[in-house]
Structures are given as structure tokens and as C-alpha cells.
Image (tube, grey):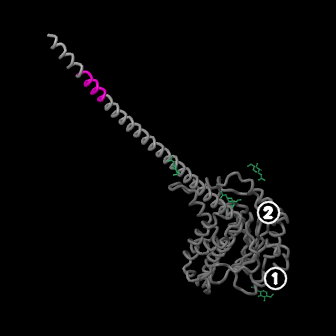
Amino acid sequence: MRTNYWNLLLAFATFVPVMLFSFSWFCLSRMAEMSNQLTNCKNHILEFKGHILHLQNRSKNNHEQLMKALSEMQDEVSQRKNQSRNLDEKKRDAPSEGEIVSNIFEDFKFFLPHLRKVKRIYPKVIIGQGKTGVSFALGVPTVSRGNYTYLKQTLNAIVTRIMPWEEKDSVVIVSIADSNGDYVKSVVDMVTKRFKRQVKSGSLEVISVPDFFYPSMLHEEPMDYSQRKKRWHIKQVLDFCVLMAYAQPKATYYLQLEDDIIAKEMYFTKLTRFVNNMTSNDWLYINFSVLGFIGKLFKSEDLAGFVHFFLMFHKERPIDLLLDEFFHIKICDVGEKLEKCKERKREIQVEYKPSLFQHVGIHSSLPGREQYLKDYFY
Ligand SMILES: *[C@@H]1O[C@H](CO)[C@@H](O)[C@H](O)[C@H]1NC(C)=O
Ligand SMILES: *[C@@H]1O[C@H](CO)[C@@H](O)[C@H](O)[C@H]1NC(C)=O
Ligand SMILES: *[C@@H]1O[C@H](CO)[C@@H](O)[C@H](O)[C@H]1NC(C)=O
Ligand SMILES: *[C@@H]1O[C@H](CO)[C@@H](O)[C@H](O)[C@H]1NC(C)=O
Ligand SMILES: *[C@@H]1O[C@H](CO)[C@@H](O)[C@H](O)[C@H]1NC(C)=O
């Protein structure tokens, strides 16, 4: 019984340390494993943190790059805006003459096939200093009337009744629509002698319409009076179109005059006051005279449209009737009764009363026609 006890005790005494040893070994190895795992875990976390930092760095870099690109884009946009503004300003300050001019004159080719082979479609500038950027251009077409001429009288009123302080902002253009060399010379002599100061300052110009502008049928000798009359009207349309196209880039407004009219005292002051007093820009032309086409004021920006229209129908109607048609097309509604539209037209057309211009001529530029009526005839 005692041996059994010792045996048991011995066995126990050996077993317990072994147990303890293996347990602590087990514990130690577990701990090492766990520590390994912890280290691993820590490494993972560090690595993760690295990734995050890297990502953060990248997104920061990306953000910076994006901001840089954005600001570059904004710079470019503002630069473009600036450029186009600068360009606009330049355009306003000095209308790029060659460009606009050649554009309207180039358009003559559409309507006048005989001009298609002409290299440079432009009137001949006899007196002029290229005055441009003014508010008002006044167009005075002139043709020989045989022994009778009213041009001197007309120009005297037109030019001297523009006050010296108003002269800077205007240009008067005399357009000789006559191939008669003597007539051209007489006009140029008269202008240079009589209006020295205005010629010198550039506020009075003289141009002439070269023969090539006219289709061959205008060069042929007309058969009878009605044919002569028709050709006279066709030529007048072309002459006015040349003058309008020439004047277009020079001024903001264009006033159509003639070579046989009288302008009233202070007419220019009254006219400019009236124009500057307009509250709306919604008008086609302003009527400063009861006479057909005389004393009609246009916005230069509209002139190309008018010239196209006049050229398209230059064989069909005299120019003042074409103006009327243009107005009708612009304001009459489709299906609206003509009477109704005419009534409306009377209301909306802009007129200055009383008339600032009237005829002086009795002798028309159409030979054989005397106009005692102070108005045009058809
Ligand atoms: C962040 O990026 C910059 C440039 O790419 C680099 O110089 C820097 O060392 C990076 N920093 C970190 C923490 O990745
Ligand atoms: C815009 O144009 C003006 C005039 O040419 C120049 O002085 C200015 O520096 C320009 N500004 C920018 C943002 O390009
Ligand atoms: C112009 O006047 C001259 C002489 O003064 C005359 O011989 C000629 O017939 C006149 N011409 C016209 C078209 O009236
Ligand atoms: C300017 O317009 C106003 C109102 O439209 C008018 O009463 C005035 O008479 C006008 N002045 C001139 C100079 O046309
Ligand atoms: C111009 O005004 C007058 C009235 O002052 C008028 O009789 C004439 O028809 C008008 N002409 C045009 C083309 O508007």
C-alpha cells in the first residue's frame, strides 16, 4: 500500500514538471506565434498606413494638378475673351475698311454678272483722305445736266450749313456718276476751289463711278423716251448702291442726298439732335424729306442689306419704290390687307417734320425732262 503511494507520488512528481514544462513551452510558443502575428499585423497596419499616405499624397498631387489645369484653363478663357474684346474694340475704333468695303463690292458680282471678271470693284477716289469712324456720312451723287448745274449751290448749302464743330464727326461724299471727262473736271475744280478747307481736313470727298460698273445695255443708245427713262432709273439704282457701299464703313449713319437740292439752315444740327434723341433703335430709316429718296437716313450696319435688295431688283423699279417695297416686306404680315399695312406703316415710319431738304432743280439729269414739280416723276 505504501509502495503504491510512493509510486504514485513519484509518477506524479515526474509528471507535473513535464506537464508544467510542456505547458509553459506551449504557452511560450503560442506567445511567440501571437507576437509574430502581432508584428505581422503591425506591419500590415504600417503598410496600409503607407498606402493611405501614398494615396493621400497622390490625391493631393492630383488635386494640385487639377487646380493647376483649371487655372490654366481659366487663364486661357480670359485671354481668349480679352483677345476677342480687344479685337471688337479695334473693329469699333477703326472699321477694317478694306474688309467691309470689299465685302459689299464683292457682292455686286452676284447681281451684276458683267462684274464677275473685274479684279477690283471700287469707285475711283479723286479727292479724299480716307476719313472714317465718324457718325454721319452724307452722299451726294451727281451727273451732268448739260448747261445747267445745281451742284455748286447744293454743296454750298450742304457743306457750309454743317457748323465747323460738327464737321469733325461727318464726311460729305460727292460721287460723280458721269463718264464725261469735262464734267468730272468741272466738279473737281469747283470743289477744290470753293471748299478748300473741307478738302484739306478730309471732311469733303469726291469719288467717281467707273464705266465698268454699268452693264452694256446702259452704254447703248436708247431708242425712245420710255427706254431712256427706264435706263435712267436703272443707272440711278446702281449709282446709289455704289455710293452706299463706299460710305458704309466710314460712319454710323448714312444720309442720302442729291445734287439739286437745298438744305435748310441748321439742317445738320436738327438732324443730329433728332437722331441722338431716338429712344429706340428699332427703325429702318428716318425720313427727313418728302422727296422720294432724298433725306433718308440709314444705319450703316443695315446698308449691306439695302444694297443687296436694290441690286437684286435694280431693273424692276426706281429706287424710291424699292425702298417702299423693302419697308412693306419688313413690316407687312403675310395675309395682312395692304390698306391695313399702309395704315400701320404711317404710324411706325419715323419722320422729321418739316422737311429739311427740297428740290431746286427744274432741269432733270434726264435730258428732255423738266421737273417743275418739286418732286420726282415716274
Ligand atoms: C508625395 O509625392 C511627392 C511628389 O510626387 C514626393 O516627392 C513625396 O515624397 C511623396 N510623399 C509621400 C509621403 O509619399
Ligand atoms: C488683356 O489685354 C490688354 C490689352 O491688350 C492687356 O494689357 C492685358 O494684359 C490683357 N489681360 C490678359 C488677362 O491677358
Ligand atoms: C449749252 O449752251 C450752249 C451755248 O451757251 C449751247 O450752244 C448749247 O446748245 C447748250 N446745250 C444745251 C443742252 O442746252
Ligand atoms: C426728344 O424726344 C422727346 C420725347 O420723345 C421730345 O419731346 C423732344 O421734343 C425731342 N427733342 C428733339 C430735339 O427732337
Ligand atoms: C417721307 O415723309 C413724307 C411726309 O413727311 C411722306 O409723304 C413720304 O411718303 C415719306 N417717304 C418715305 C419713303 O417714307
Where does the image place residue 270, in percent across and percent down from the top left? 79, 59
Q: Is residue 218 magenta?
A: no
The answer to which quarter of the image holds residue 116 is bottom right
Name the image quarter holding the C terminus.
bottom right
From the viewer's perspective, is residue 217 above or below residue 200? below
**Residue located beneath label 1 in the image:** 189
Element marked by disc 2: helix
> Residue at horizontal 31%, vertical 31%?
30
Q: Amino acid at mark 1?
A: Asp
Seen in the image, is 24 located left or right of residue 134?
left
> From the Cβ of disc 1, is ligand 3 less than 8 Å away?
no
**Residue located beneath label 2 in the image:** 268
Residue 368 seen from this side: no
Measure how far apart labels 2 and 1 are at the Cα level: 26 Å
Magenta region, residue range: 15-26
Where does the image place residue 62, in percent across and percent down from the top left? 50, 49
Choose between 55 and 187: the one closer to the eye: 55
The answer to which quarter of the image holds residue 244 is bottom right
Name the image quarter holding the N terminus.
top left
Choose between 115 and 5: the one closer to the eye: 5
Disc 2 residue crowd, few under 14, some 14–19, many 20+, Cα 10 Å: many
From the viewer's perspective, is residue 12 above or below residue 108? above
Q: Amino acid at mark 2?
A: Phe
Choose between 324 and 130: the one closer to the eye: 130
From the viewer's perspective, is residue 16 above or below residue 116? above
Residue 1 seen from this side: yes
Secondary structure mainly formed by the magenta segment: helix
Give the residue furthest to the left: 1
| Label disc, if present, on residue 371 of the rendered structure | none
Mark 2 in CB contact with mark 1 (< 8 angstroms): no
From the viewer's perspective, is residue 254 above or below residue 181? above
Where does the image place residue 326, in percent across and percent down from the top left? 59, 63
